[in-house]
Image (cartoon, rainbow, N blue to C red):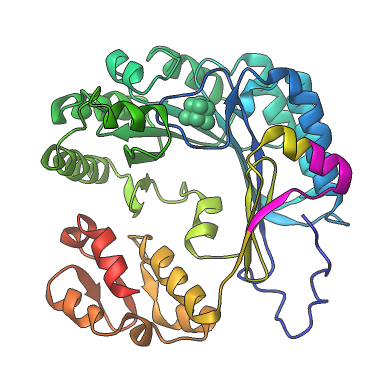
């Protein structure tokens, strides 16, 4: 990542605002015990022997920042960051803390998978300054974990939580609905098991058959039967009702939290604010330029060793395209929605201009709620969110 200007040194740009100058950093660790069937993240199994070289590369990439950059949130994702051994984890956290010093009261999340977290690693995370863990549970049904090709058992989730609960003030887990073989009743069971574990934050995603993944190939070959649309809708509807009734408010299309437990880092993405990103395949958004690193690990290691930079695809959005993208992201925030004044301030465009006739149409059709200041999805709108968003922009 090349940073040519420091905050306060960018001609023509207001640099104290988070949509121009990043206050968030993402760091990617690609190693996994095993490649799950649905996964299209920059992750790979069988490459643990490259972990030390990878950490060298990450340090080199962060050095290219030129000077440490204070941030409000850090997210170390993967892959499986907790696949690193305690010594490697300690080294990673030290380097990240040096280059991305966290502001007082900041949020520092690390993703973990059940079965990869032990007491020694959990202690290293706490000592390193991590205060939030996001645990990939996905399901509590052995058959559904098998369909996803996850290599952990349901029992490993409560075991991991025994390590997480006493150490971290914030934690969350991810669940997936619409897995082949699932039914509304099995999904209800998953939610009840999850709620019994007392989370303050839950992410519930509908399964996506990402092109090129093992699951996508199985589906195309007729080897797996996707859950029908009606059942998937029932599952999503039940998720909203059940979690809301438990005090976990829906604050994004797939995310639920008690007040004060929302993911501050992900809120940066949904505000379309700027962020740093380092590591294999990591995306970043700096001064209106969105780019991501190569997803090829040997090439990443080579490029970083040679030049300190492994940037791949880069996209500079024109102001109107950026405004449209901001609208889509802001509307994903189901609780606060899109504030017209905030949108104008950030993009220079009036939301009504961007949305055109689709705004009154969907407002009158009961899919959007509009109080004159804020626009957000109604409950009916949530089930047609993709269509409404594409109509609006
Ligand atoms: S553990 Fe996560 S990142 Fe790793 S292969 Fe599975 S889904 Fe992908």
Q: Can residue 95 be seen here? A: no
User: Residue 37, percent across and down?
Assistant: 41, 25
Above or below residue 12? Residue 70 is: above
Residues shaded magenta: 302-313
Asked whether residue 240 is drawn in magenta, I would say no
Q: Which residue lies furthest to the front in this view?
A: 221
User: Left or right: where does residue 6 sit relative to residue 238?
Assistant: right
Q: In which quarter of the image is the N terminus?
A: bottom right
Q: In which quarter of the image is the C terminus?
A: bottom left
> Residue drawn 54% across and 25% down?
164
Q: Can residue 234 be seen here? A: yes
User: Residue 231, percent across and down?
Assistant: 13, 37
User: Residue 64, percent across and down?
Assistant: 85, 53
Above or below residue 381? Residue 109 is: above
User: Residue 63, percent across and down?
Assistant: 86, 48
> Residue drawn 26% across and 79% down?
371
Pick the residue in front: 59 or 91. 59
Residue 217, located in which quarter of the rendered image?
Answer: top left
Pick the residue in front: 278 or 134. 278
Asked whether residue 307 is drawn in magenta, I would say yes
> Residue drawn 15% across and 42% down?
229
């Amino acid at each position: 990542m090349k940073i040519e200007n420091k905050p306060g040194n960018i001609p023509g740009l207001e640099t104290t605002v988070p949509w121009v100058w990043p206050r968030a950093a993402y760091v990617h660790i690609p190693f996994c015990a095993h490649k799950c069937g649905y996964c299209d993240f920059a992750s790979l199994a069988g490459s643990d022997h490259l972990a030390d070289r990878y950490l060298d590369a990450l340090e080199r990439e962060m050095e290219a920042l030129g000077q440490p950059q204070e941030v409000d949130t850090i997210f170390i994702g993967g892959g499986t960051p907790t696949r690193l051994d305690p010594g490697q984890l300690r080294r990673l956290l030290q380097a990240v803390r040096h280059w991305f010093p966290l502001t007082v009261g900041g949020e520092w999340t690390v993703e973990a998978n059940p079965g990869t977290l032990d007491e020694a690693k959990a202690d290293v995370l706490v000592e390193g300054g991590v205060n939030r863990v996001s645990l990939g549970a996905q399901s509590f049904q052995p058959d559904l974990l098998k369909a996803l090709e996850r290599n952990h058992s349901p029992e490993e989730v409560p075991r991991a939580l025994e390590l997480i609960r006493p150490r971290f003030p914030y934690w969350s887990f991810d669940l997936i609905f619409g897995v082949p073989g699932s039914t509304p009743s099995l999904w209800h069971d998953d939610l009840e098991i999850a709620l019994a574990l007392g989370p303050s934050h839950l992410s519930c995603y509908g399964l996506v058959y990402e092109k090129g993944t093992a699951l996508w190939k199985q589906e195309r070959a007729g080897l797996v039967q996707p859950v029908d649309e009606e059942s998937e809708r029932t599952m999503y509807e039940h998720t909203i009702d059940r979690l809301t009734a438990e005090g976990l408010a829906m604050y994004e299309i797939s995310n639920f939290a008690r007040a004060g437990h929302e993911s501050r880092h992900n809120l940066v993405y949904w505000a379309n604010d700027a962020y740093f990103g380092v590591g294999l395949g990591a995306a970043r958004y700096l001064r209106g330029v969105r780019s991501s690193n190569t997803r090829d690990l040997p090439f990443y290691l080579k490029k970083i060793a040679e030049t300190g930079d492994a940037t791949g695809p880069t996209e500079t959005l024109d102001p109107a395209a950026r405004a449209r993208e901001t609208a889509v992201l802001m509307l994903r925030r189901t609780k606060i929605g899109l504030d017209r004044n905030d949108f104008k301030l950030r993009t220079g465009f009036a939301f009504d201009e961007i949305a055109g006739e689709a705004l009154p149409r969907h407002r009158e059709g009961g899919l959007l709620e509009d109080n004159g200041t804020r626009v957000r999805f109604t409950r009916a709108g949530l089930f047609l969110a993709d269509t409404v968003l594409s109509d609006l922009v």
